[in-house]
Image: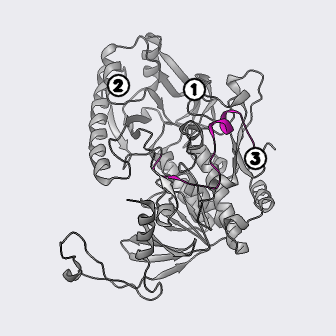
Amino acid sequence: MKRRDFGKLGMLAGVGSITGVSTVHAGKDSRGFSEDGKFYQEPTNKLPVREFDVVVAGGGTAGVCAAIAAARTGAKTALIETKGYTGGTITEGGTAIHSFYNLWKAFPEVEKRQVVKGIPLELIDRMIEIGGCTGHAEMERGYDYDSVCTALDTELYKLISMRMLAEAGVFMALNTMAVGTVMDGKAIKGVIVESKSGREVFLGKSFVDSTAYGDLSAHAGAEFVVPNDYACCNSIGLGNVDMDQYHAFLKQHDAVGQLARGLRSGQGNQLVRLSGRNVNLPKEYLTEAQAIGMSGTLTTVHNNYIMFVKFNYKVPGSVLNRDDMSKAELEVRERQFRGIELFRKFLPGCSEAFIARTSPTLNIRRGRLISCDYDITHEDVIEARHFWDEVFVYGFHDSAPRLQIKDGGTYGIPYRALCVKGVENLYVSGMMLTSDHRAHMSTRNTVSSMAQGQATGTAAALCAKSDVGSRGLKYHVLREQLERDGVYFEY
């Protein structure tokens, strides 16, 4: 489907009155079918309207921070999320979140700096308070990849993120999909949503797309491509396992890769992250692990439990195609079953391991790439470039140690990189920006996405308050608000 055709669907979905009472149909009139029977024309309904200042689509890694930031900045804010909880990739897709710090340990002369603060850090502090986080555990081995490991209890993160949204006064529309837009020229006027309560329109002044797939941007007619340049993954949690015995197994085979100690079941200096190097391990284990895309990097927050075991799979076709993804969902669950057998057979302390948690869907690393006013380059990232309009700084690269940010430093994310090209009042935050795959291996990561969320939510609220579009917001106004809200800048 062409981008412009997708945008037209969003317009057509909003044709007719956007006020009044929703029409609920027990069934549709069969006369709506085309002569060849391949299409059906739905009758036009009157949809009830809710009014907000800021509407955030997607309650995942970025969207949580965006909605909290918008509400705290004084905007009446709605958050639309397809699942019954918030958190996204943080709760479903990775082994830890990366990274609140610069890569200081890989550069002996570089000072340690916590470079992402504000709302993302507040979420982590709240998690530590209730025993749901390892803290920022320093890496003892493998610190040329990241200097710290910050691992979370997935279920408690859902709770804390929802608590903070409620405390900020965000209207949470959970179990709700954004299915279209109402456009006013090049500006979004409203988002059409659908849930078990029916179809509604959420009107707003400013909008943030944090859907990961770029759904809201596509509905608004924004330019996009679908690179399909990553494997997807699904992660599982394992019960009846022993992290210390896994460590002993790796030591026995001289295969310890990454290692970090932090808070585990409330006690400090415990193993919380381990990875195995592919040397000296049993050949049968390595061959099968590679065949099923099983990562050897494990993290935990609790005794007798491994929080994340990740299985990667490159989806044939497209991550936007329902049928391709349906087949992939089964394939990855088959791989999980084979993975648990590997644990039971080869890893000491895991003979009675069982799958205690899976992600509800495959997790993508990139869906649509949305065209924005500025496209962050590979050189911007690794050369540690900063910008006159940056909204936060970041210092982690997922391709380290092969690719690292110069001298253990940081680079800036410019405001322009979050403004959707061709739409007057829409921001993106999360994995939808940056066309260069090498740069995207940094910008897409969880802590970067959280910081993007705070930046876009704050900007959206300020725009709504001043009744201007995203390009009418004065940078110094945004920068001053971000600094008041704890965002760290180096320049």
Q: Which residue is mark 3?
A: 387
Q: Which residue is mark 2?
A: 289
* Type of secondary structure dominating the magenta stretch: loop
249 to 240, vertically: above or below: above
Tags 3 and 1 touching, CB below 8 Å: no
Is 237 left, or right, of 392 in this rendering? left
Q: CA distance from mark 3 to mark 2?
A: 43 Å
**Is 197 within the magenta?**
no
Residue in view at x 42 percent, y 29 percent: 295
Which amino acid type is marked by label 1?
A: Ala
Closer to the eye: label 3 or 1: 3
Q: Nearer the viewer, residue 365 or 82?
A: 365
Which amino acid type is marked by label 3?
A: Phe
Q: Nearer the viewer, residue 205 or 334?
A: 205
Nearer-N-terminus badge (2/1): 1
How far across and down, in percent of the image, does residue 139 sit?
A: 61, 26
> Range of the magenta residues?
366-387
Q: Which residue is mark 1?
A: 260
Tags 3 and 2 touching, CB below 8 Å: no
Q: Nearer the viewer, residue 322 or 394?
A: 322
The image quadrant where one finds the C terminus is: top right
Q: Nearer the viewer, residue 295 or 121?
A: 295
